[in-house]
Amino acid sequence: MRARCALAVLGLVAVLLAGCRASGHAAPTSPEPARPAWQSVTLPVPPGAPGRLLLRDATACAGRWFVVGALVDAAGVTRPAAWTSADAVGWTPLRPVPRSPYGAENVLTAAGCRDGRLAAVGGRSGGVHGNPRISTWRQSGDGSLVEVPAEFEVFGGPDAVNVGRIAGGPRGWLISGNRSTGAAAWLSADGSDFRLVSGVPGLAADGAGRPWVSDGVATGSGWLLAGSVLSSGRTGSDPVVWRSADGLTWRRAVLSVAATDEDLQRVVRLGERVVAVGRRGDGLGAWLGDGGAWRAGGGFGGAGTDRPGRVWASAAVAGGVLAVVAGGATGAGWFSRDGVAWSSVTLPVAVPARSDRTVAVAGGDASALLLVDDGTGAQVWRADGPWSPG
């Protein structure tokens, strides 16, 4: 009898372990989360008419930090706003210089950084049909943020779907987004003029499926886009990356074909390695790119969060990756030094799941900046760690 009981217990353990492996995500490396000393940050109200802060994105590079968004007055009229800091503690508003009527009411939605200077994407709905009127913004030599107006068809027009995130790198600037033809990229050497690349092999929808780009990053050999493809003839999506040396010719690589939905939502460069994170099974997971070769990394998040499939933001912090997902204050932060082993990080606030809210994170050598805009107010925090327990 004792032998049969022992075998039954062993069998149950084996089944449970198999279920854990099949779930597609691993438990954190420690049940005790890291508890960074988050400190609230106050952004000064820029000169001009008063209004409530709308915060949309944050970025950092070369010892400079940036936050972008807008101010909105009681009548709902917006004006662009951006701030910079050398230490993520004391902040200075940047002077926006709009060059078009729509630019004067832009909400800056995405921020990128290169050589300590900011570039941003902004927009405001307008015209007869209320279509988004997109502009880019570049930081000039005197520190002001100058609008670069574009013809409507560059970012809009009949093929428009969305204009997403912006990334800086040695070759200039990359904006990632999507058109009715499939995935899209906008390239500029200096931020003064962007060229649309869409409908080309690799980016265009084809017999293999319809692609969707979520993020982009500069690499040592060019540019990388991350997203998914809705495959033809089956339900669910598969994680995909696109690589390009010049931003004009793109090669698509599907990383896995799973029975459940998988996608890539954010991507971060760590030296020569790239870490992408997104939905995997009933949780979240990482994929690791090294020298053009990709493999699955560790899992994190999952059941028990408000929306297990949502990665709001990720950033390189202290030699690793900090990811912020939808969930409670003790379940929305995750950190990994290698993309394989992930541990929980306590955040100063719960992270909303609704898509009309905004969450962003930026990272420096050892520090991180977190912003959350819940639709009624915006808050910003910074911390220097610790980012992993122990």
Image (cartoon, rainbow, N blue to C red):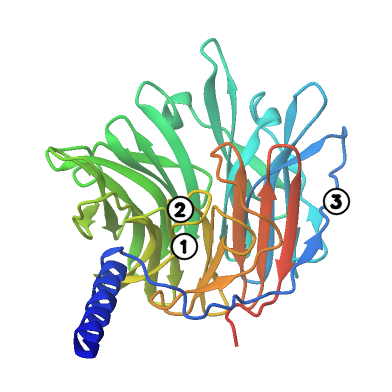
Calculate the distance from the C-alpha at mark 1 to the C-alpha at mark 3: 35 Å
Q: Which of marks 3 and 2 is in front?
A: 2
Q: Residue 244 versus residue 34: which sits nearer the camera?
A: 34
Q: Is residue 185 left or right of residue 390?
A: left
- Please tell me which residue is depicted at 60% across the width and 47% down the height of the picture: 352
Indicate which disc residue 128 carries. Answer: none
Which of disc 2 and disc 1 is earlier in sequence?
1
Q: Residue 17 versus residue 162: which sits nearer the camera?
A: 17
Percent x, y for residue 349?
A: 69, 57
**Where is mark 1, residue-wise?**
301
Calculate the distance from the C-alpha at mark 3 to the C-alpha at mark 2: 34 Å
Q: Residue 124 versus residue 328: which sits nearer the camera?
A: 328
- Please tell me which residue is depicted at 29% across the width and 60% down the height of the picture: 245
**Secondary structure at numbered mark 2:** loop
Hey, what amino acid is under mark 3? Pro
Crowding at mark 1 (Cα within 10 Å: few <14, some 14-19, many 20+): many
Which of disc 3 and disc 1 is earlier in sequence?
3
Quadrant in the rendering for residue 293: bottom left
- Please tell me which residue is depicted at 14% across the width and 43% down the height of the picture: 208
Hey, what amino acid is under mark 2? Pro
**Secondary structure at numbered mark 1:** loop
Q: Which of marks 1 and 3 is in front?
A: 1
**Where is mark 2, residue-wise?**
308
Residue 45 against residue 268 in the figure, above or below: above
Percent x, y for residue 340?
A: 38, 76
Question: Is the C-beta separation of discs 1 and 2 under 8 Å?
Answer: yes
**Where is mark 3, residue-wise?**
44
Q: Is residue 242 left or right of residue 152?
A: left
Hey, what amino acid is under mark 1? Gly
Tell me the quadrant of the picture where the C terminus can be found: bottom right
